[in-house]
Image: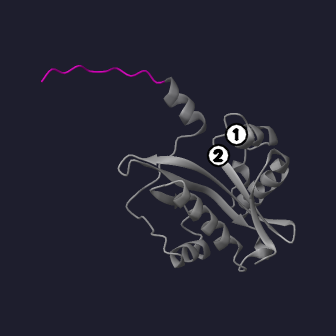
Amino acid sequence: MEKFIIRKATKDDTGTVLSFIKKLAGYEKLENEVKATRDLLEKNLFGEKAVAKCLLGFYDGVPVCFSIYFYNFSTFLGKPGLYLEDLFVLPEYRGRGFGKAMLVHLARTAVEEDCGRFEWAVLDWNEPALKFYESLGAEKLDDWIIHRVTGEALQKLAKETVEIKDKTL
């Protein structure tokens, strides 16, 4: 794979990153969920207070895949973890090892950063991805259920008032 390179995305790549996000959303049948804009990506991926990182994979100079990741923290391990938010390879470039190369690159990053784990979520219907990740030694965690609060529900929760009950034992 000498013609394949992985590099950190820069602010100049914002349009390419947004294009990959939209293509991923199309693949996952979630096009209506995309709220990302160039400005939001520039701020949150490349700005002064960037909260995530992005990698691009190029084959013969053409962007063929991307990943977005960030660091979380494991209280039990007492170490950071690397969380892969998204990994997407253009359909016409799948099966050539680009996705695996991206995962190996991220695993090496996790090891270099002394992360206690490297994890991600996969949609339950995405059998090709599930089989691929399991072939790499990834463990499927059926005992954890992801919860999410977004949109109006998040706004409502943030406005809640909480009454603390002081009960003396």
Q: Is the residue under label 2 in contact with that under label 1 (CB below 8 Å)? A: yes
On the question of residue 144 being in view, the answer is yes
The type of colouring in the image is one colour
Q: Residues within 10 Å of mark 2 (few under 14, many from 20)?
A: some
Q: Main secondary structure of the magenta part?
A: loop
- Residue 118 coordinates in the image, percent (x, y): 51, 60
Quadrant in the rendering for residue 62? bottom right
On the question of residue 120 being in view, the answer is no
The kind of secondary structure element at disc 2 is loop
Residue at far right of view: 61
Q: Earlier in the sequence, mark 1 or mark 2?
A: 1
Establish if 39 lies above or below 107: above
Give the residue at x 37% y 61%.
143
Establish if 106 lies above or below 165: below
Q: Is residue 34 magenta?
A: no
Q: Which residues are magenta?
A: 160-169
The kind of secondary structure element at disc 1 is helix
- Residue 163 coordinates in the image, percent (x, y): 34, 20
- Residue 54 coordinates in the image, percent (x, y): 70, 53
In the rendered structure, which amino acid carries the disc numbered 2?
Ala
Find disc 1 in the rendering and name its residue: 44
In the rendered structure, which amino acid carries the disc numbered 1?
Asn
Choose between 143 and 110: the one closer to the eye. Answer: 110
Q: Residues within 10 Å of mark 1 (few under 14, many from 20)?
A: some
User: Does residue 117 appear left or right of residue 131 in this picture?
Assistant: left
Establish if 164 lies above or below 139: above
Give the residue at x 63% y 41%.
51
Find disc 2 in the rendering and name its residue: 52
Give the residue at x 23% y 19%.
166
